[in-house]
Image (cartoon, rainbow, N blue to C red):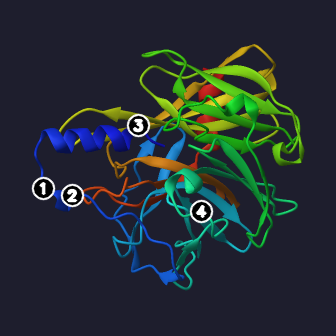
Amino acid sequence: MRPARLILALVIAVGLLPPVWLRDPPPSGKASRIGAIIALDHRGARAGPFVLAGAWRIDGDPKMFGGFSALAALSGDRLIAASDGGKKIVFTRPDIGGPPPVLSPFGPETDVNKIGADLESLTRDPESGMLWAAYEFSQSIRRFTPELVDDGAIRPAAMRDWGDNSGAEAFARLPDGRFVAIEEGAREFGGYAHRALVFPSDPVAGGRPKAFRVGVPGGYRPVDLIAIDEDRALVLLRELVFGFPPRFATAIGELDTRSIAEGVQVDVTLLARLGDGFPADNYEGMALTDDGDGRHLWLISDDNLMSYQNTYLLKLRWDRECARQKARE
């Protein structure tokens, strides 16, 4: 994440808002249940090929809960969300129902501060169940077993000068075994080309990356990445919209992963802007499920630990006929 936190703090300071707007940092400690997962009226909003099929707000103790910036689908109809404060929740999809989620640490217990715990993206191998996480500040990648036990880490030299608050927010394993990481910050102020790395294999196992660039539509920044087939990946895009208070615009784009090669620039094609009918917030995490009634994209929002933001979970049905029609146009 997060240029947003610094900018939001500055706006609040300038506006002389009372300190009650800010939450305390989430403390470490024993597992804790979340207060509630509340269904919202979604009214079937549409954006490009995506139809809003479900929307929920996840509430919890504000002193322990929030800041979710990564999402992944697990086996058994479960989702895992991880925060940039080193926490996680594992829970059954709310469209299916199940026991309330539990908030607990993610990663080694030695991660006692944001620099060591700023997890921004998750990706999973569906066959082995292994997960990988990308972190800002430390500019590192960690691997976890299916039981979420730490299984190694690396700090790639090619990522060490990536932005402390705008590093590898978008990170994904591709079906062919490659891994892609995209820097959230652009190379130049006001620019749209973002540095990126492609690892030929597991980075933690020693895969050596090659550099390329990703072109993002103006105003947006890449905050998550997920493969959808052998040739394509979806990119979650976010734009900070200045106001009082600031707000966020969300879009979804597509990346041609076949075109990735050392030294080239691969441009993101915009598929949808989430507008009216979609709960607006700072969406940073993305997961994909293939269900009996179709393919669904899940989004989770990071509330920046601000009292006027929310942790939303959205379920978007992917209208493949609409997507094919757009491709023919």
> What residue is drawn where x is 51% and y is 35%?
166
* Amino acid under disc 4: Asp
Q: Are marks 1 and 2 in contact (CB under 8 Å)?
A: yes
In the picture of the structure, the residue carrying the numbered disc 4 is 111
x, y percent for residue 271: 54, 31
Which SS class for mark 2?
A: helix
Judge left or right: residue 215 versus residue 42: right
- Dividing the picture into quadrants, the one containing residue 24 is bottom left
Side of 324 where 66 appears, left or right: left
Residue for badge 2: 21
- Badge 2 crowding class, 10 Å Cα cut-off, few under 14, some 14 to 19, many 20 or more, is few
Which residue type carries mark 2? Trp
Cα separation between marks 3 and 1: 22 Å
Q: Residue at x 73, y 69 (%)?
A: 148
Q: Which residue is mark 1?
A: 18
Which of discs 2 and 4 lies nearer the camera? The answer is 4
Residue at the spot of label 3: 3
Q: Nearer the viewer, residue 245 or 326?
A: 245
Q: Could you say whether the residue bearing mark 3 is in a helix, strand or loop?
A: helix
Residue shown at 89% from the left, 47% from the top:
205
